[in-house]
Image: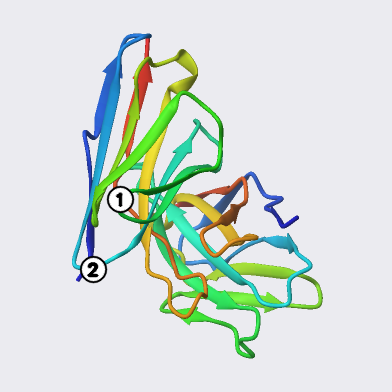
Amino acid sequence: AQKITQTQPGMFVQEKEAVTLDCTYDTSDQSYGLFWYKQPSSGEMIFLIYQGSYDEQNATEGRYSLNFQKARKSANLVISASQLGDSAMYFCAMTGDSNYQLIWGAGTKLIIKP
Amino acid sequence: SQTIHQWPATLVQPVGSPLSLECTVEGTSNPNLYWYRQAAGRGLQLLFYSVGIGQISSEVPQNLSASRPQDRQFILSSKKLLLSDSGFYLCAWSVLNGGIQETQYFGPGTRLLVL
C-alpha cells in the first residue's frame, strides 16, 4: 500500500530564506502523481504543485519547486525567498490505488519569522 | 473559471441532531466530487467520493452518508451526530482525463463542533 511520510512536524524559518519541506513516499506503482498543498489558518486547502512519476524535470510554479528524486522516493517542496504569508500547514500527497484516492501525509507546520 | 462553495462555514450542533452540509461546484461539468474530514492537527481522511449523479462510494464506515442529487451538488448528511463527528469537513472536485488522476481542488470547508 502507498504511504506518505513527512518527518518535520514543524519548522521555523527566517523571512526571505529558502525552505525545504521533506516528503518521502512508498509505492510499488510505476505510474503515480505527487502533490503539495498549503493549508493556512483559514482552513482552505490550496493546491501548490504537481509532479508525475514520468516527468523528467522537476515541477516549478513561481516560488515553489518540487525536488523529485525518484530513486530515493523523495518529493521535497522548496519555497524560495519565503514570505510571512507562507506560514501555514503543508501537506504532501500521492495517488492511491484508485484514480479517486489521494494518500496524505501528516503535514508540516511552517512558521516564517520576520 | 471553476469555483467551489461550501456552507455553512461553521456549525455547532448537539449530539443526536441531524446534519446537512452542502457543496456546489461552478464552471465545470461532470466533476468527481469528494468529502474529506480533518481532525484538529491531523491529515485528511476521505469519507465519500462520487463520479456522477447518484453514484456514491464510501471509504469509511460511519454514521454519515452522502448524496449527489445534481451534477455539481454534493451533500453530506447524518441522522444523528456523534461527538466524534466534530472536525473540519472539506469538499473537493476533480476532473479525470484519460483515467489519470487529476488535481483535487478544495472548498473553504465547514467547521463542525458537536456538543
Q: Nearer the viewer, residue A38 or B20?
A: B20
Q: Does B59 appear above or below A82?
A: above
Where residue B68 sits: x, y (%)?
Answer: 29, 46
Q: Kindly state the secondary structure of the residue where label 2 is placed.
A: loop
Q: CA distance from mark 2 to mark 1?
A: 14 Å
Q: Position of residue A8 (x, y in %)?
A: 67, 49
Subunit ID for the residue under disc 2 = B
Q: Quadrant of residue A101?
A: bottom right
Q: Report the disc number at residue B107.
A: 1
Q: Is residue A83 visible?
A: no
Q: Is residue A62 left or right of residue B58?
A: left
**A30 lies left or right of A56:** right
Three-letter code for the amino acid on which mark 1 is drawn: Gly
To which chain does the residue with label 1 belong? B
For residue B82, above or below residue A101: above
Residue A11 showing in the rendered view: yes
- Colour treatment of the image: rainbow
Decide which of B20, B69 is in the foreground and name it.
Answer: B69
- At 45% from the left edge and 22% from the top edge, which residue is drawn? B85
The amino acid type found where label 2 is placed reads Thr
Nearest to the eye among marks 2 and 1: give it.
Answer: 2
Point 44% across, 67% down: residue? B103
Question: Residue B17 — which label?
Answer: none
Residue B28 numbered tag: 2
Q: Determine if marks 2 and 1 fall on one subunit.
A: yes
Please report the residue visible at 50 percent of the width from the left and 31 percent of the height from the top: B39
Q: Residue B61, located in which quarter of the rendered image?
A: top right
| Residue A4 sits above or below residue A49 on the image | above
Q: Position of residue B81 (x, y in %)?
A: 39, 16
Establish if B33 lies above or below B18.
below
